[in-house]
Image (cartoon, rainbow, N blue to C red):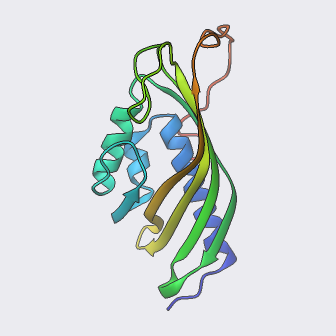
């Protein structure tokens, strides 16, 4: 069993940061790199039979959706066989064209998105390419549908993230 160091814990924090950034900037090839080849997924609204199916599912699900994901307050702990387990508090906001879809089989008239709160339960394993997510479960405490007014916001001139700033 290999020792888990504080540097390992920091690498896992950076790995999860990349996960959120790649999802929101829709960098699907880069997203695939955060997962071990045998990663297992649970709790998502699309097919998750392995990391390739997960990434394809995320890409299809978020097509036409503006997403904002935030992960914070990580509780990371060394686990058996040199692995790390963690729980991340999460917030997400998904916005789509009003009335174009619902969420988890619930279609509300004029729905234009959701705001969600919950946690990610994850396990990480060191690979030849560094730490990778080998298990990911999304749990939710609350989902608030976005309906009615509020979809249209002013067209602010906002700077956008440079997708490969750290690559």
Residue 18: image x %, image y %? 55, 50
Tell me if 163 is positioned left or right of 38 in this view.
right
Q: Residue at x 41, y 47 (%)?
A: 44
Single out the residue that lies furthest toward the bottom.
Answer: 1
Q: Residue at x 40, y 22 (%)?
A: 101
Horizontal arrangement in the rendering, residue 127 relative to residue 112 (left or right): left
Give how far across and how far down residue 12 sits, in percent: 58, 65
Residue 24: x and y in percent read 52, 36
Instruction: In the rendered view, tell whether residue 54 sits above or below residue 64.
Output: below
Residue furthest to the right: 73
- Classify residue 63 by image quadrant: top left
Image height of 102 relative to 72, above or below: above
Q: Residue at x 63, y 58 (%)?
A: 88
Query: At which x and y percent is residue 108?
Result: 47, 20
Count how many numbered circles sit on residues in the image: 0
154 is higher (above) or lower (below) than 32: above
Out of 58 and 160, give the one closest to the viewer. Answer: 58
Q: Is residue 128 above or below residue 27?
A: below
Q: Is residue 49 visible?
A: yes
Q: Is residue 6 left or right of residue 36?
A: right
Report if residue 69 is visible in the image.
no
């Amino acid at each position: 069993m290999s020792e888990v160091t504080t540097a390992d814990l920091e690498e896992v924090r950076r790995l999860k940061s990349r996960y959120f950034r790649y999802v929101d900037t829709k960098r699907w090839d880069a997203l695939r790199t955060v997962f071990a080849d045998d990663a297992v997924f649970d709790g998502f609204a699309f097919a998750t039979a392995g990391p390739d199916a997960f990434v394809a599912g995320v890409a299809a699900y978020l097509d036409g959706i503006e997403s904002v994901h935030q992960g914070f307050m990580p509780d990371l702990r060394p686990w058996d066989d040199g692995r790390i387990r963690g729980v991340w508090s999460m917030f997400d906001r998904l916005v789509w064209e009003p009335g174009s879809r619902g969420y988890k089989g619930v279609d509300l008239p004029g729905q234009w998105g959701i705001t969600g709160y919950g946690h990610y339960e994850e396990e990480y394993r060191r690979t030849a390419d560094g730490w990778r997510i080998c298990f990911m479960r999304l749990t939710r405490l609350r989902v608030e549908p976005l309906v009615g007014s509020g979809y249209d916001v002013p067209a602010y001139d906002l700077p956008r993230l440079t997708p490969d700033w750290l690559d």
